Image (cartoon, rainbow, N blue to C red):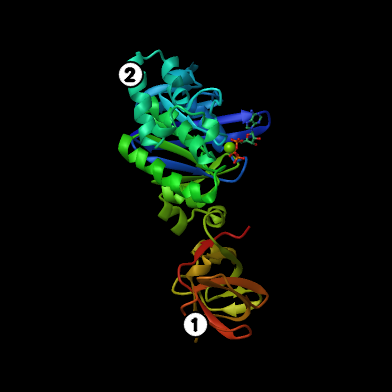
């Protein structure tokens, strides 16, 4: 059952529609990542859920309780929403100790002293900060400071964690480690997460579902496997993982790529609507194109680069370029060789 519900939520800034009629359901204990290019409306969405931003349209509920509604002119202020928040910038107060940083929201809520101490110590323990509790957060690394922010969010025992690129200012090494820590904390405490990121591997690793947004409009919501394996459109295909696109002229019996006549790739013919339109875009992952000796889409290897574990090929089909990646353990064609390409799982999209 949906725990967090966003219904037709919109937000405009002057002429810019930052978020356009967004529908999203998040289950209790679920982690949903919002992914998309800069300016697509991720932070604005998070701020509306948090209550820092009012809506221009739609409504938001958590656990059946109304938080914001344009129609009903209702708006619950952020401090009355039980949300933990961590942002990209290290939002720690250097003049307070690590302990006081974490205890701060509990003091604001005027909890009994013993409760404040117990909850703060618990949050510090789960973020491995107990030994640093008396020191200043300024003595900690970037990862340490983000842990303080995380502990502070945990201490309020949130129903929902709102995380806005919390790891993007960390070194890659720390980033991976912190992903696991966040996931562990979620398992232990059972809160839901709405996680904003630019980083597709972070979204894939952390979340149960991914929402991909472009210019305020949702493109697809699905499991990491769904958005990677069956992208709803060309934008999603290109945004998640490596991609290779070929403009194809289509007839009922075959296709033309880069001025060359080819058979249908693999067993998968394009949808009838594209054949009727006479043109379409063939999308493939470079790792999901195989070399075949006979048949396939015929081309010539123009470039071959060793990337360590994989070899990256550029194959010319007429004047179109196809990118293929294979493990170095499988012998492949040499530069200048003629080869056949078998598209293992092609996707078809309408031409631009
Ligand atoms: N307070 C504001 N006033 C005017 N325009 C704003 C304001 N906040 C956001 N915008 C605009 O709304 C759009 C969405 O911005 P938002 O910050 O939500 O994007 P984002 O997806 O978080 O981007 P990034 O990945 O760069 O953080 C952008 O065009 C931005 O310029
Ligand atoms: Mg942002």
Nearer to me, 201 or 92:
92
Image coords of residue 314 (percent x, y): 61, 74
User: Which residue in the protein does label 2 denote?
Assistant: 115
C-alpha span from label 1 to label 2: 64 Å
Q: Position of residue 117 (x, y in %)?
A: 36, 21
Q: What residue is pinned by disc 1?
A: 331
Which residue occupies 39% across, 26% down? 155
- Asked if disc 1 and disc 2 are in contact, CB closer than 8 Å, the reply is no
Quarter containing the C terminus: bottom right
Question: Does residue 235 appear in this view?
Answer: yes
- As helix, strand or loop, the secondary structure at mark 1 comes to loop
Left of 202 or right of it: where is 158? Answer: left
The circle drawn on residue 88 is: none
Question: Where is ligand 2, by quadrant?
Answer: top right
With respect to residue 312, does 197 lie above or below?
A: above
Residue 113 placement (x, y as % from top left): 36, 14
Identify the image quadrant of residue 63: top left
Q: Is residue 157 visible?
A: no
Say which label, 1 or 2, has the lower sequence index: 2
Is 61 left, or right, of 303 in this rendering? Answer: left
Q: Nearer the viewer, residue 184 or 130?
A: 130
């Amino acid at each position: 059952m949906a725990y967090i519900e966003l219904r037709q939520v919109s937000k405009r800034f002057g002429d810019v529609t930052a978020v356009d009629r967004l529908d999203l359901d998040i289950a209790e204990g679920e982690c949903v990542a919002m992914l998309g290019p800069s300016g697509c409306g991720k932070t604005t969405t998070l701020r509306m859920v948090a209550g820092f931003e009012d809506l221009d349209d739609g409504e938001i509920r958590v656990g059946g309780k109304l938080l914001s509604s344009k129609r009903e002119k209702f708006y619950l202020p952020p401090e009355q929403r039980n949300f933990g928040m961590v942002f990209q910038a290290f939002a720690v107060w250097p003049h307070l100790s690590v302990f006081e940083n974490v205890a701060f929201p509990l003091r604001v809520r005027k909890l009994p002293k013993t409760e404040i101490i117990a909850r703060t110590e618990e949050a510090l323990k789960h973020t491995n900060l107990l030994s640093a509790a008396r020191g200043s957060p300024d003595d900690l690394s970037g990862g340490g400071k983000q842990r303080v922010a995380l502990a502070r969010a945990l201490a309020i025992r949130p129903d929902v964690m709102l995380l806005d690129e919390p790891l993007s200012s960390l070194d890659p090494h720390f980033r991976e480690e912190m992903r696991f820590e966040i996931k562990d904390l979620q398992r232990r405490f059972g809160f839901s997460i709405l996680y904003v990121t630019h980083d597709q591997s972070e979204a894939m690793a952390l979340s149960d579902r991914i929402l991909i947004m472009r210019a305020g409009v949702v493109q697809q919501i699905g499991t990491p496997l769904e958005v990677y394996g069956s992208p709803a459109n060309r934008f999603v295909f290109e945004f998640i993982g490596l991609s290779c696109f070929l403009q194809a002229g289509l007839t009922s019996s075959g296709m033309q790529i880069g001025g060359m006549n080819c058979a249908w790739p693999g067993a998968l013919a394009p949808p009838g609507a594209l054949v009727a339109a006479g043109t379409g875009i063939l999308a493939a992952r470079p790792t999901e194109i195989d070399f075949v000796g006979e048949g396939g889409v015929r081309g010539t290897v123009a470039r071959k680069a060793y990337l360590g574990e994989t070899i990256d090929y550029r194959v010319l089909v007429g004047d179109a370029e196809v990118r293929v990646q294979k493990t170095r353990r499988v012998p492949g064609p040499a530069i200048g060789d003629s080869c056949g390409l078998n598209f293992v799982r092609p996707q078809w999209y309408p031409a631009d």
